[in-house]
Image (cartoon, rainbow, N blue to C red):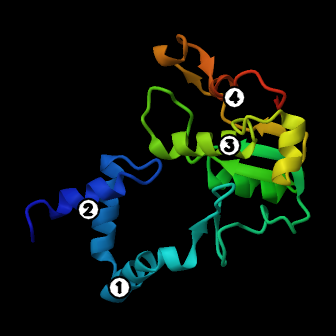
Amino acid sequence: MEPNYFLELRNLLEKLPGVGPRQAARYVWAFLDFNKKDREKLADLLENLDKNLRRCAECFRAFMGIGAVCGFCSPASRREHNKIMVLERDSDLLNMEKSGIYKGLYHVLGGIIDPSDENIVTRGRMKALYERANLDAGVPPPLAGRASGRPASLEIILALPTTKLSSPAVGGAGKWTSGVLRNYFGSSDHQAR
């Protein structure tokens, strides 16, 4: 065995949400106790992940299927295209869908909003939301809707955790994550609540 094998595998597993060094080590030991057939199956499933699951180019939710856009974001969908609910994770989207109370579109950030964190995924998805809402097109919102095929009036619903940030980068302690996103959008005619 290579001297760093255990550490490399543990470090990779630590990238999973909610997994720290001790939990990652437990996973390594559990994999060691799997029979060879189960380990091979796991390796095969991970190897073929990109062939079977993808992220929607619009909302970034994980979906199975073909094409760049999921069934929710497809122009042919019966979803309410004038609403976008901003969520932290795919699991939040699944919970909303199970409730059956929301019929609009989604935008999955992929993590918490923390300006002091250099999470490229979350920052990129915030920028994509900004672009999706047509705020950077240089066209007033009523015209932007017609130009892009999107509704002229867009409601952005922030369904984010009520976590307080302590970073001075957001103007001091006590800023709420939803407030950071509101500040990111600045003053616009788009409604965010």
Give the crowd class for mark 1: few <14, some 14-19, many >=20 residues within 10 Å.
few
- Residue type, label 3: Glu
Regarding mark 2 in the picture, which secondary structure is present there? Answer: helix
What mark, if any, has residue 131 been given in the picture? 3
Quarter of the rendering occupied by the C terminus: top right
Q: CA distance from mark 4 to mark 3?
A: 10 Å
Regarding mark 3 in the picture, which secondary structure is present there? Answer: helix
Q: Nearer the viewer, residue 31 or 142?
A: 142
- Residue type, label 4: Phe
Q: Which residue does the numbered mark 2 point to in the structure image?
A: 9
N-term mark: 1 or 4:
1
Image vertical order of residue 141 relative to residue 43, above or below: above
- Residue type, label 1: Glu
What mark, if any, has residue 185 been given in the picture? 4
Label count reads 4
Q: Which residue does the numbered mark 1 point to in the structure image?
A: 40
N-term mark: 2 or 1:
2
Rendered location of residue 181, percent (x, y)? 66, 29
Regarding mark 4 in the picture, which secondary structure is present there? Answer: helix
Quarter of the rendering occupied by the N terminus: bottom left
Query: Which residue is located at x 29 percent, y 64 percent?
Result: 28
Q: Quadrant of residue 143?
A: top right
* Viewer can see residue 16: yes
Q: Nearer the viewer, mark 3 or mark 2?
A: 3
